[in-house]
Amino acid sequence: MKFANYLFNARKVNNLGDNMQLIAIDQIYERMGIPQKDIVYIDKNELSTYKGEYVILPVTMPLIDYIDGGISARFSDHIVPVFLGLTLVTDTLLPEEVEYYRRFEPIGCRDERTLNTLRRYSIQAYLHGCITATLPKREIEGKSFNKVFIVDIPDDLVQYIPDNIKKDAVWRTHLHDEPIDDPKALMRQYYEDYKSEAKLVITSLLHCSVPCIAAGIPVILAKTDISYRFSWVDKLIKIYSKSEFLNINWNPEPIEYEEHKERVIQTTIERLFNAYKKYQAIYDISWFYEQREKNEYIVDAFQTIKTFIDEKMTDFNATYEYSIWGLTQMSTLTVSYIKQRYQNAKLMHVYDSYRKSVFEGITSESPENIRKYKNDIIFVTTNGAQSAAKELFNDIGKSSESYTILEVIR
């Protein structure tokens, strides 16, 4: 079993901040001492189809594109998600999503809206904030920082920026319409620029402001309106809304929260290692057997029933009436196979010699009652009924064209 991280290159607009979160996960892995060879990078658009070696995947990026089944269909069964920074736009969950989140509790949420949504469904959750808040402080010893970076600010803010700040500022965007070969590398370069040169960063972006705050860079965070996505950042820094642009402090101090940062890092590392310890042994066993040259496989006990259905029930629109004798998993498989092929077929009776049970909404009855319904197609779906079925069918003169008996292929 290995650890994983995303690969992400947007199909249209690339918000480089998405990859800033992946850079932060790489830093966590470095802190954990995970060798590069033990990290698998999975394209974000291929998470549901991934079938490689089993992995632990920290979930930090927004997963807001639509997918049938929601989060329950988001990850393949070869991925064990550890939710560190989940963020949701919706405030409702599908039943299958609730079940999925509960499998992987506790859920770390990036914002308070998501936290409240999960808690309404009695899902254990906590406010983790963004993983980029765990990035280390920059080295300042012997360094000189002399640049102001202005990154994707509201148009209305420009008039309020003092001329001496605007004069030599570097104006930059993290939102790129054009194709980018490696957005993660570009984001890493931008971040290195901020760490090595910035005396001040002015921005409206979450994943520009937070990484810079974490690095110890003075930041002015200003937005026309404050999104729910920032409903945790305001614990660390003042967020200026449009009505407050006139009152901005243009000479802010760096934010200091190293003790809290270390607590978040240690909690994150502990959660990842705990997930690894929980799943590593069982999935390594499974992976050993899964990695083989595979044959064509059949459900041998079902083969005689399947052959009968395929050969005798040839009209897919017909109103076939059939019954089951002997309640086993083979009964469920038989009914499921018929339902998939014949929309008008109808299960009439369920027979079992030893118990009264409700199956597919029908209460089981004694096989002796078959004498009253000689024309039904009968599927005998248990080994234990073979002899009794043959004897009864012979006694009532039932045509071999109207029944089949489970036989295991040798």
Image (tube, grey):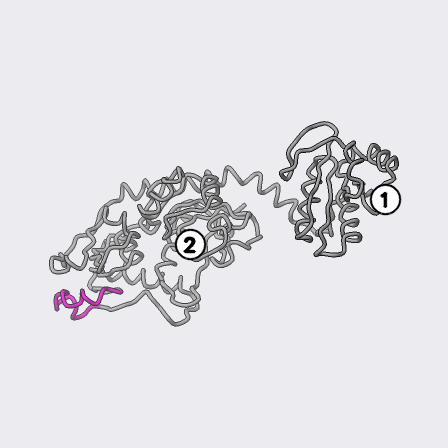
The residue under label 1 is 399
Where's residue 262, x and y in %? 31, 42
Which amino acid type is shown beneath numbered disc 1?
Ser
Quick check: 234 above or below 174? above
Task: Determine which quarter of the picture holds residue 382.
Answer: top right
Label count reads 2
* Image position of 108 (left or right of 96): left
- Say which of 255 and 231 sits in front: 231
- Say which of 22 and 75 sits in front: 75
Where's residue 104, x and y in %? 46, 41
Name the residue rendered at 50%, 38% in the picture.
277
The residue under label 2 is 63
Q: Is residue 161 magenta?
A: yes
- Say which of 215 and 91 sits in front: 91
Q: How crowded is mark 1: few (under 14 residues within 10 Å), some or many (20 or more)?
A: few
Under circle 2, the secondary element is loop
Quarter of the rendering occupied by the C terminus: top right
Quick check: 254 above or below 108? below
Marks 1 and 2: which is nearer the front?
A: 1
